[in-house]
Amino acid sequence: MATDIESPFSPTSPDPDPSIPNPIPTTPTTFPLFPLLPPELRLKIFTLASSPPLNPIIHILTPSSQYSTPHPKFISNQPPHPLLHTTHLSRHTYIRSASLTPAFNTYVSFAHDLFYFTNFGLIDDLTFSRLRAFLAYEEARFIKRLAVRTVLFDRAGLMILEGMETLQEFYVVWGDWRGVRETCMERGVRFKDVEEGELMGKERSRGMERLRGGIHSEFLGWWFYLFILFLSALWRIKFYSTFWGF
């Protein structure tokens, strides 16, 4: 009686169904064995993970409403780096590699971060008081990159420059003109933002300043001349009134 002998090359399982997609392996989100790695290897991993952010970090500063409390409200456009709250070693490694300094109740990099004054309220005496209080704040003296809006720059630009000795970069932020630009593009109107000196040239700009000064002086001269005529008329009226006994 013949018996079937199983060949060692015969398949022991059915062929997979090609209509069924292969499962995609999932990427593990945890590594429980990481604490068991040698310290030098863990330090190397944290150092490689301490790369600087791709986008610039901008800290928005809003001054306190109380003169006695110069500490501003502090909002960043990016959350704190994950290594700051992973382990003690990761925190220490990131602070050292990113040159962070404890300031404003957080960690900042005065060399790379940009500090932005967005809202000082109305430009009045209270605003200047808040600004002076902030400039006297110890941590504000280390700011190297600062951005302010035009309304604050026009009124307190020199005060800021004189009060921040370590300042290296100063940004003046204009309003959002995208709507104006888009309207100009639709109508075929050229839109360009220039300063007066760039528009008229330095020599013409100086000439315009002299012209303004001359007009101002001439305007004051005419008012002074009219004032003298007015006093002369009053003196004549008083003289004739006294002479004729009015």
Image (spheres, rainbow, N blue to C red):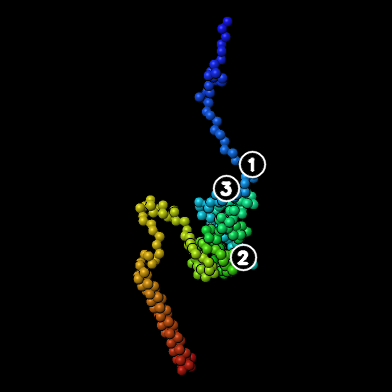
Identified at 62% across, 46% down, the residue is: 38
Q: Earlier in the sequence, mark 2 or mark 3?
A: 3
Residue 52 placement (x, y as % from top left): 53, 53
The CA distance from mark 2 to mark 3 is: 40 Å
Count of labels shown?
A: 3
Q: Earlier in the sequence, mark 2 or mark 1?
A: 1
Q: Given the image, on which type of amino acid does mark 3 rest?
A: Ile
Mark 2 crowdedness (10 Å alpha carbons): few <14, some 14-19, many ≥20: some
Q: Given the image, on which type of amino acid does mark 1 rest?
A: Pro
- Which mark is on residue 166? none
Residue 111 placement (x, y as % from top left): 53, 60
- Badge 1 is on which residue? 32
Q: Is residue 198 visible?
A: yes
Taking depth in this image into account, of 218 and 11 the one nearest to the observer is: 11
- Is the C-beta separation of discs 2 and 1 under 8 Å? no
- Which mark is on residue 70? 2
Q: Nearer the viewer, mark 2 or mark 1?
A: 1
Identified at 35% across, 71% down, the residue is: 203
Identified at 59% across, 55% down, the residue is: 95
Taking depth in this image into account, of 110 and 193 the one nearest to the observer is: 110
Q: The N terminus appears in which quarter of the rendering?
A: top right
- Badge 3 is on which residue? 45
